[in-house]
Image: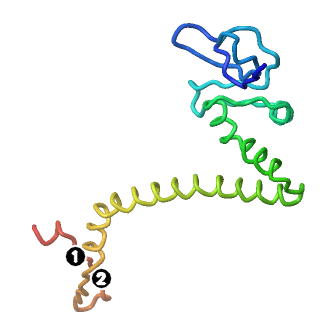
Amino acid sequence: MAVRMRLFRMGRKKMPCYRIVVMDSKVRRDGRYLDKIGFYNPLTKPETIVIDKEKVIEWLKKGAEPTDTVFNILQKQGIALEWHLMRNNLDDKARSIELQKWEMSRGIKKPIALATSVESKPESKPEEPSKPEPVEVEEEKAVVVEGEPEVVIPETPEATEA
C-alpha cells in the first residue's frame, strides 16, 4: 500500500479550503483517509497553514510521500528541511543550528524588501515641498531706519512681485 500526504478538499463552490491528510494513493481525492495532519486555506491573506509537525515526521519515517503541493507547504513551514537534516543523521544540536539559520534568513529577507520599498517612495515625494522652503530662508536683508532699532525683513517671492 503506497501512502501519500495530500490535500483533501473542503469548503463550498469557488471557496476551497483543504485538510492535509495521509491516505492510500489509490483512494479518490475526497475518500477515506488514515490521519489528518493539518489544514490549508489558500484564500486568506496570508495563507493559513496549520500543520502538526510531529505527525508529519512520524508519517515520513513510515514512508509516506508528500505530493508536490504538500511538499511546497512543508518547505514553507521548515518541516521539509528538518526531515532532510534528520535523514542525513545530524545530531540535535547541529540540526537546531541549521534550523535557526533558516529561520533567520527567512525572517531577514522580508523586512529588507519592505524597507527598500518604503525608503524609495518618500525620496521622490519630499522634493516638491522642499523647493519653496529654501527660497523663503535664502535671502534676508537688514533695513536700518534712523532712530529705530535694526529690523530684519525676510524677502519672500510675494514681496518681490508686488
In the rendered image, residue 77, in percent from the top left (x then y), is placed at 71, 40
In the rendered image, residue 121, in percent from the top left (x then y), is placed at 39, 56
Local secondary structure at mark 1: loop
Q: Which residue is mark 1?
A: 155
In 3D space, how far apart are the residues under numbered discs 1 and 2 (Cα atoms)? 10 Å
User: What residue sits 29% from the left and 82% below the top?
Assistant: 152
Local secondary structure at mark 2: strand
User: What residue sits 70% from the left and 11% below the top?
Assistant: 27
Label 1 Cα crowd, 10 Å radius (few <14 / some 14-19 / many 20+): some
User: Who is closer to the viewer here, 160 or 81?
Assistant: 81
Left/right placement of residue 142 relative to residue 53 reads left
User: Who is closer to the viewer here, 58 or 20?
Assistant: 58
Q: Which residue is mark 2?
A: 152
User: What residue sits 75% from the left and 18% below the top?
Assistant: 23
Q: Is residue 143 above or below residue 89?
A: below
Q: Is residue 28 above or below residue 2?
A: above
